[in-house]
Image: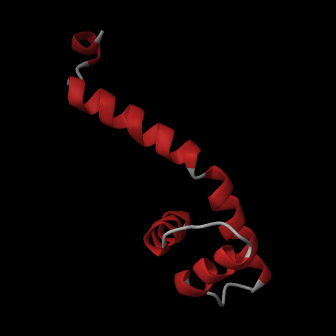
Amino acid sequence: MLKLAGLSRSTFYYQQKMASLAERHAALRERIKAIFAFHKGRYGYRRVTAAIRQLGQNVNHKTVQRLIVEMG
């Protein structure tokens, strides 16, 4: 199948892994959007991370920063 598609095995498995990571952070992404919208876009990743931690979810600041950048 990969030969027909012209893909290498590593590319296939990389794309498969990236798709599962996107699903893994779907709930966190929605929570970030809600906090960001509630504060009218004035919160950066540090304050968003602190707000999420106050809600009781343990999250790394680097993950929050990456997701904010991805959301654009």
Q: Give percent across and percent down for residue 16.
A: 40, 32
Q: Is residue 20 left or right of residue 11?
A: right
Residue at far right of view: 38
Q: Is residue 61 above or below residue 28?
A: below
Q: Give percent across and percent down for residue 31.
A: 71, 65
Q: Is residue 3 left or right of residue 67?
A: left
The residue shown at (54%, 85%) is 46
Q: Quadrant of the N terminus?
A: top left
The residue shown at (74%, 86%) is 40
Counting labels gives 0
Q: Is residue 36 above or below residue 6?
A: below
Q: Give percent across and percent down for residue 22.
A: 52, 47
Residue at far bottom of view: 42
Task: Please identify the quarter of the rendering in which residue 32 is found.
Answer: bottom right
Q: Give percent across and percent down for residue 58.
A: 59, 67
Q: Is residue 58 above or below residue 11?
A: below
Q: How is the image coloured?
A: secondary structure
The residue shown at (66%, 90%) is 42
